[in-house]
Image (cartoon, rainbow, N blue to C red):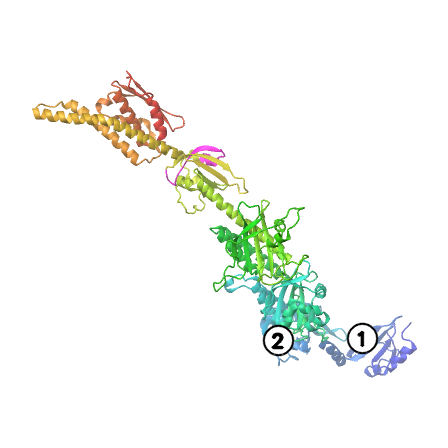
């Protein structure tokens, strides 16, 4: 239709609101009395754009078919209506002019500053600290210059008080242009979002991530308590309980109660009512316990509900963690009935503060923070067990390692008592004996009520498939052995319940009056159950199948550490018992382990740790050894010894490792130990031979002395030359004896580079002139160098040549040649007229003696 119909015109003319019907051509068609009072020129046929309308606030409503209905009001009235609307907003509103002076401020904004602050007529930026004031004034000028809205966040914001604590927020200011009639820009409207809830979220996040004294890492329970203390300021409550849910979400177990309940809350699992589970899956909810029990009387027996009622708590608010698929519950309780009910009907902004308790709990958005804290607790638990494995690896005995394991498990899972059983030797797994338990004694020194007697053994009954089960034997043996051998973590949660036969649940250890529930974790190695971890509690329903799934893998991993510890100890003992030297090095030759024999060869201290970073190549005593160690030959003969020493020859066999680190095992054959035995035998034989040779010269010397005495008594001159020669031979024999005895007393060897030509000349010069004349030394090849004990080689040569000189009156020709390996020397001895008494093969003796001197 074109314009208003007759009925509408009649209603318009009688309306107290100033209305003008304007046609499509811009001419006034109808104006009521109120409109003519405000604007006398608004007569029919007049242009609606008359300048007199500029002092009015005009609201245009388009009409179907063309034209518009103008609603007129004075500027003060329009402002009052707009200010009334601003008062109803849940956030702060401030209207300023072009100079930044405050024209209007609503109650929500006034509450952000101290009481008594003057607002109207003051510069808005002056309400902020100096640095923030400059930021606010700059953004206002920018908005007025551009005529477009803008937003800024003030770093130095408002102080928000919650629970006696003061929080500093970072408010967000939005500047919106304010136009007067005629589209004149007269100022701005500032929307203030104080972000109080965000400030509280930051404070809660800081509390949850807090550190202990001195920057120490806090336990997850301490962090959770600090978080709940700060949450108490934002959401007042009397008790907070964090509970975890089972995988089937039918059971709940409190893991933290803050502050601690009096009387204490039972530590076990409690059934989760179906009605609560349905509410949790839909989000946070509130409930009053009396109302809940009136509706569901069976809940009065629920341990968690009964504990709250016993403490006088009646109101409760539950927050699922995380929402949608809850794994845990944050439950806040109060002694004031209806404390968490949000029934005031007020439109609360997410930024407004303070808010009702339940509204605060929802608006704080705690789900990500609480989920992160639970994940942190899981990671801390994993880290605890990694550190536990390291501690167990540093212990000296298997018994100490098991005590550390049990003590840590009891502390981590808050068990009452834990015991570790080991399968009896020479048993098929049907009997286990107590290996370790914790705690065994209480603080006052008395035995723990759940402790087992020393030497306790436990039988397992495991009937084979198809045989009849003997119930009496099964009951006596505790938990069925067939179930234990299945390798499952078994839980008996309630001794008061009865099974299908009317019996109490089976326990691994014989049940006693103090048992309320138990959990058994079998530990299998190489297809057999070697260990059994059994823990009991005084409380009912202290364990759930989820506990077995959670603790079982951790316990088995730690038990593998125990088994590896035992294997390492046995390997160490085995290596120490090997007579050969055993060295273990890594891929680059760093020493990892050495038994006593290997330490002797390398000159290392017994019982002390191996030098850190010491490599086997540092103990190599010649280039050939370095070359062998750098290669990959499986066997060889090398020279090893203390750092800076001459070392000794050893036969070595390299056994490449098969582990991931490519460790190598070196077997050092005691070559010098065999030489030692040979040396002792040889020296003993030498001394016996020298003693046999000494008898004749001693008798000769005694005879000569008597003859000289008689000749002197008769006045005759003795045969000086003959006596001198005989005495000289006797002196040589005494010298041989002295050297042999010295070699026996000090049978140490050195590794010298011996020039054989020089040594032969030295030995030749030691004989009397008459014997030297009988020795003919052939020209020796140049560079005739061997390695060995120089003194021992000299002794061998002197003894051999002395024996030949004593047995052969003719000249003796000596020729020497070195073996290609540089370790042996062969001698060629010949006489011009060999006597029948010449010992067979003297060159063989020389060669063997030279080998022994290596």
How many residues crowd mark 2 within 10 Å: few (<14), some (14–19), many (20+)? some
Residue 850 in sight here:
yes
Q: Residue furthest left?
A: 715
Residue 758 in sight here:
no
Q: Nearer the viewer, mark 1 or mark 2?
A: 2
Residue situated in front as seen by the camera: 796 or 478: 478
Say which mark, if any, is on residue 59: 1
Snapshot quadrant of residue 840: top left
Q: Secondary structure at mark 2?
A: helix
Against 219, residue 115 (above or below) is below
Verify whether residue 747 appears in magenta. Answer: no
Residues at discs 1 and 2 in contact (Cβ within 8 Å): no
How many residues crowd mark 1 within 10 Å: few (<14), some (14–19), many (20+)? few
Residue situated in front as seen by the camera: 712 or 605: 712
Say which mark, if any, is on residue 127: 2
Q: Quadrant of the N terminus?
A: bottom right
Residue situated in front as seen by the camera: 763 or 413: 413
Q: Residue furthest top?
A: 833
Q: Secondary structure at mark 1?
A: strand
Magenta residues (range) = 626-645
Q: Earlier in the sequence, mark 1 or mark 2?
A: 1
Number of residue marks: 2
Snapshot quadrant of residue 185: bottom right
Snapshot quadrant of residue 512: bottom right
């Amino acid at each position: 239709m074109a314009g208003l119909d007759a009925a509408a015109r009649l209603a318009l003319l009688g309306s107290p609101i100033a209305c003008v019907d304007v046609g499509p051509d811009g001419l006034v068609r109808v104006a009521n009395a109120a409109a003519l009072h405000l604007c006398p020129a608004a007569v029919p046929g007049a242009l609606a754009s008359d300048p007199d309308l500029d002092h009015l606030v005009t609201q245009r409503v388009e009409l179907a078919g063309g034209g518009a209905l103008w609603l007129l009001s004075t500027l003060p009235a329009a402002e009052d209506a707009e200010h009334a609307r601003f008062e109803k907003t849940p956030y702060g509103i401030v209207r300023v002019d072009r100079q930044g002076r405050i024209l209007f401020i609503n109650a929500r904004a006034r509450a952000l500053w101290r009481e008594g602050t003057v607002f109207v007529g003051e510069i808005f930026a002056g309400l902020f600290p100096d640095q923030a004031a400059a930021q606010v004034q700059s953004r206002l000028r920018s908005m007025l210059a551009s005529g477009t809205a803008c937003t800024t966040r003030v770093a130095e914001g408002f102080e928000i008080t919650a629970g006696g604590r003061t929080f500093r927020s970072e408010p967000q200011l939005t500047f919106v242009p304010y136009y007067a009639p005629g589209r004149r820009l007269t100022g701005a409207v500032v929307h203030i979002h104080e972000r109080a809830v965000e400030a509280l979220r930051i404070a809660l996040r800081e509390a949850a991530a807090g550190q202990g004294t001195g920057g120490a890492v806090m336990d997850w329970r301490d962090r959770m308590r600090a978080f709940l203390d700060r949450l108490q300021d934002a959401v007042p409550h009397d008790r907070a309980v964090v509970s975890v849910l089972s995988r089937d979400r039918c059971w709940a177990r409190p893991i933290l109660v803050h502050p601690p309940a009096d009387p204490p809350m039972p530590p076990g699992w409690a059934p989760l009512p179906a009605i609560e589970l349905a509410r949790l899956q839909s989000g946070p909810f509130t409930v009053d316990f009396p109302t809940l029990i009136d509706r569901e009387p069976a809940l009065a027996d629920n341990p968690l509900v009964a504990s709250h009622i016993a403490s006088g708590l009646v109101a409760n608010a539950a927050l699922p963690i995380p929402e949608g698929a809850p794994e845990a519950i944050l439950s806040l309780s109060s002694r004031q009935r209806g404390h968490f009910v949000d029934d005031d009907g007020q439109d609360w902004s997410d930024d407004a503060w303070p808010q009702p308790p339940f509204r605060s709990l929802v608006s704080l958005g705690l789900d990500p923070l609480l989920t992160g804290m639970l994940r942190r607790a899981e990671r801390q638990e994993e880290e605890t067990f990694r550190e536990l494995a390291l501690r167990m690896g540093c212990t000296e005995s298997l018994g100490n390692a098991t005590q550390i394991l049990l003590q840590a498990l009891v502390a981590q899972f808050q068990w009452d008592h834990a015991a570790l059983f080991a399968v009896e030797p020479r048993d098929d797994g049907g009997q286990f004996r107590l290996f370790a338990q914790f705690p065994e004694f209480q603080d006052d020194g008395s035995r723990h009520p759940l402790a087992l007697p020393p030497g306790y053994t436990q039988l397992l009954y495991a009937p084979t498939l198809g045989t009849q089960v003997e119930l009496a034997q099964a009951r006596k043996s505790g938990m069925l052995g067939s179930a234990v051998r299945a390798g499952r973590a078994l839980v008996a949660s309630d001794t008061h319940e009865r099974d299908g036969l009317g019996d109490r649940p089976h326990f691994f250890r014989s049940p006693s009056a103090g048992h309320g529930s138990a959990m058994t974790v079998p530990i299998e190695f190489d297809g057999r159950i070697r260990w059994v971890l059994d823990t009991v509690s005084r409380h009912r329903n202290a364990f759930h199948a989820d506990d077995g799934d959670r603790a079982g893998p951790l316990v088995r991993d730690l038990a593998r550490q125990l088994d590896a510890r035992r294997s390492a100890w046995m390997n160490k003992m085995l290596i120490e018992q090997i007579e050969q030297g055993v060295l273990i090095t890594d891929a680059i030759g760093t020493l990892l382990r050495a038994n006593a024999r290997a330490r002797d060869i390398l000159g290392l201290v017994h019982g002390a740790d191996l030098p850190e970073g010491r490599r086997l190549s540092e103990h190599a005593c010649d280039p050939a050894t370095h070359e062998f160690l750098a290669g990959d030959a499986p066997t060889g003969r090398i020279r090893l010894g203390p750092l800076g020493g001459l070392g000794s020859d050893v036969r070595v066999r390299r056994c490449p490792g098969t582990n991931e680190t490519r460790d190598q095992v070196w077997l050092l054959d005691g070559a010098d130990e065999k030489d030692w035995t040979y040396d002792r035998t040889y020296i003993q034989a030498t001394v016996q031979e020298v003693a046999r040779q000494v008898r004749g010269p001693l008798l000769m010397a005694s005879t000569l002395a008597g003859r000289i005495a008689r000749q002197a008594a008769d006045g005759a001159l003795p045969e000086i030359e003959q006596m001198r020669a005989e005495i000289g031979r006797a002196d040589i024999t005494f010298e041989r004896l002295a050297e042999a005895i010295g070699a026996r007393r000090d049978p140490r060897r050195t590794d010298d580079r011996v020039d054989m030509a020089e040594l032969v000349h030295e030995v030749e010069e030691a004989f009397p002139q008459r014997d030297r004349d009988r020795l003919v030394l052939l020209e020796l090849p140049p560079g005739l160098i061997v390695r060995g004990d120089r003194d021992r080689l000299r002794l061998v040569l002197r003894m051999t040549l002395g024996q030949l000189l004593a047995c052969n009156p003719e000249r003796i020709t000596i020729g020497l040649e070195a073996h290609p390996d540089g370790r042996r020397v062969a001698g060629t001895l010949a006489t011009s007229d060999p006597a029948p008494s010449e010992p067979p093969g003297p060159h063989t003796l020389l060669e063997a003696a030279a080998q022994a001197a290596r």
